[in-house]
Image (tube, coloured by chain):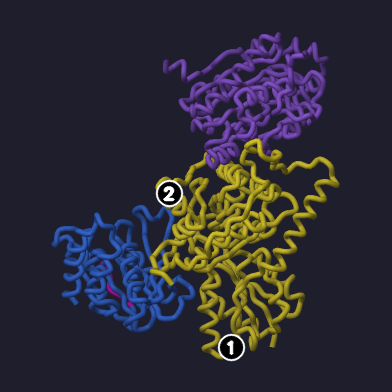
Chain colours: A purple, B yellow, C blue
Amino acid sequence: MSKTIYAKPKSLTDTTFRYCPGCSHGIVHKLVCEVIDELDIQGKTIAVEPVGCAVTAHNYFNFDVVQAAHGRAPAVATGIKRSLPDRIVFTYQGDGDLASIGTAETVHSATRGENITVIFINNTIYGMTGGQMAPTSLPGQVTQTSPYGRDTHTQGYPVRICEMLATLDGPSYIARVSTDTVPHIKEAKKAIKKAFENQINGKGFSIVEILSTCPTNWGMSPIEAMKRLQDEMIPYYPLGVYKDVEEVNE
Amino acid sequence: MGEKVLMKGNEAIGEAAIRSGCRHFFGYPITPQTELSAYMVKKMPKIGGVFLQAESEVAAINMVYGAAAAGVRAMTSSSSPGISLKSEGISYLAAGDLPCVIVNIVRGGPGLGGIQPAQSDYFQATRGGGHGDYHLIVLAPNSVQELVYLTADAFNLSDEYRIPVMLLGDGTLGQMMEPVDFDSIPEPVYAEKPWAATGTENKRDKNVIETLFLEATELEERVLEREKKYDVVKEKLQRYEAHNTDDADIIISSYGITSRVVETAVKILRDEGIKAGVIRPITLWPFPEKIYKQVKPKAFLSVEMSTGQMVEDIRLACECSAPVYFCGRTGGVIPTPDEVVQKVKDILKEVK
Amino acid sequence: MENCEVILAGFGGQGILFTGKLLAYAAMLKGKQLSWLPSYGPEMRGGTANCHVIVADEPIGSPIVTKPNILVAMNKPPLDKFEDSVAKNGYIFVDSSLIDRRVERTDVNAVYIDSTRIANEIGNKNLANMVMLGAILKTTEVFSLSEIEETMKKSLPAKRLPLVETNMKAVKEGYDLV
């Protein structure tokens, strides 16, 4: 008798990922879908996908998906959740979408304590448009629009979303996780699960920032990219739980 | 007819929307439409509805996008500068074939412009406003009672055709009070929405609301499919009011509050023996072009609170059967009946 | 007169819009055609306020009154601004407590009412509009006293119904002055 020890989550379609080799989207898509399966909410879930590489997420997610305009995913999710309060609504956004063009929507859905879940992929670069400087690009980072390295005098500093949102009363759960090692990926899944459970329990806004890689636009091999995440990103974007209302209350 | 109530135009839109089954309103404050939001925020909590003051017009229209995608009747309202901000979202709503109602209580522009009534957003409303090949159905009421009727129609039409509908008013209509009867408004006709993103409940294949098509031929196909729908709407939905056109030497066109000024002017003209007639477009898109091909005046006149926008549609519609003149004020100034009367007399000297 | 085109004007806080609403509501109760159009915008707070009311038998064209047959000037700027536009043989009501000049036109009926002072005397300067309304009713007979009282009862929210008596007292003061 053979025994199933691993299966692709049913919330993922059979479509092969078209993301670049070494890109973290595949990992995060799978984690999100595993969580949705484990919580048995596939039939209740509505995803809001962003503009960015994950604009194709609906090819992989096996539940209802609404594609939002660039940066507007939290507003779209708000509209859905307020219309269907018993459904599970999450946004899946990159750093350009969430932390640049959509900053207002991010901050205000957070401060309203909107009962949604936000999955935030921070890979410090615009992927889909070919590697431009992101709001989260590190000081000195070379991109297409910072060819001499991000100059903080003229191009400013990276935005630390978790730290910023943690100053608000509205959000219930804010965590930053990473996809660089197996233990970190396990941590990431736990955080994602909590962010969905919070919504199920009516706790309000939960966001998980996931430090991710973009080997193609970083001009690196997948292994080099993973090393950059560990050596450069994690020191600048410390991992951890930035807010957890449950803990505060207990 | 039921009992009449005295109500401001803006508030009447709110009540009509609620009676039309709208339970989701996403707003952002701007003069001169504020009373509509104020009405909704008081009423919605009492009937289990949602009123949300968004962080911006951009967010408000995207909340409408989400609510419409989820299959409910949703509405937002604003005034000119706010509609410019919403235009991004409106393009997406059109691209997603999502029904919703957008109210524009127009004020003077461009830029911040002013807060007095204007009709200078005609091009924006009828030509798109946002990017891409799309149209809205644009309804232009001219009284508080008609605001109410057309609000009800707006929800039904939007559901029927899956086209966002814009209710185009102006500061005067929004602010004025007239008696209004709610019992005679059209009943809500709810469309099935099997396309909506409501969660599959593991009973159907997933629904995806998407507006990105990277294959040029696929996008073209989608756009042309929508164009066919627009053709149906153009054929079936041209609405207007016309009178005194048979013997008319001049036919005056105007919409919204300006048409009320024109009615007064036409009364004066007819009393003086001048043969003036009226075509008042009620749908601005589709423009009621057919009627313009059936009439034979010596001249057409478009009266607008703009520098001349609808006048172009009249020129297209009448196919040069007579010269088309323009008379208007802009920036928030309302033309007077006397100005219209004088313009008509000047034109008739020219075309005789 | 049964029908009228009215411009009421003064400064914010004088109850200009409310007075206009009473006329509009009274017209509705009588089954008349009517429109009520306020000025709007920042000037509503302390600046000038005006509203246009039309009462008619036929459907109303433009709700903007360009040739009023009743002008009510509760302070000087509107008298200066609108005096010339009043229709021949029309009425100009002037709050002579606050306006120190006479109407210059000779082809209109000018009515001077010391409404703000009288309102003060009966205990509330905010009732100047009601005193003026009384004078308008008596002079033009556009509505009867009982029609206006009925209108107040029907249009005011329940918690403000006690105001009907106070308002009507002021209306009668103005009515008896003319």
Mark 2, residue position: B47
Marks 1 and 2, the one that precedes in the sequence: 2
Secondary structure character of the magenta stretch overall: loop
Going by the numbered disc 1, the residue's amino acid type is Ile
> Could you say where residue B26 lies in the image, as x and y percent from the top left?
52, 46
Which chain does the residue under circle 2 lie in? B
Q: Determine if residue B157 is in view.
A: yes
The residue range painted magenta reads C100-104
Mark 2 residue element = helix
Q: Determine if residue B85 is in view.
A: no
Q: Nearer the viewer, residue C142 or A224?
A: A224
Are the two marked residues, 1 and 2, in contact with CB atoms closer than 8 angstroms?
A: no
| Mark count | 2
> Could you say where residue B68 lies in the image, as x and y percent from the top left?
60, 47
Which chain does the residue under circle 1 lie in? B
How many C-alpha atoms fall within 10 Å of the one at disc 2: few (<14), some, or many (≥20)? few
Same-chain check, marks 1 and 2: yes
Quadrant of the drawing holding the N terminus of chain B: bottom left
Residue B256 is left or right of residue C67, and the answer is: right
Mark 1, residue position: B274
Q: Residue B68: within the magenta?
A: no
Mark 1 residue element = loop
Q: Residue furthest bottom?
A: B273
Find the distance from the CA under tag 1 to the CA under tag 2.
Answer: 53 Å
Q: Residue at x 65, y 34 (%)?
A: A47
Going by the numbered disc 2, the residue's amino acid type is Ile
Q: Residue at x 25, y 68 (%)?
A: C95
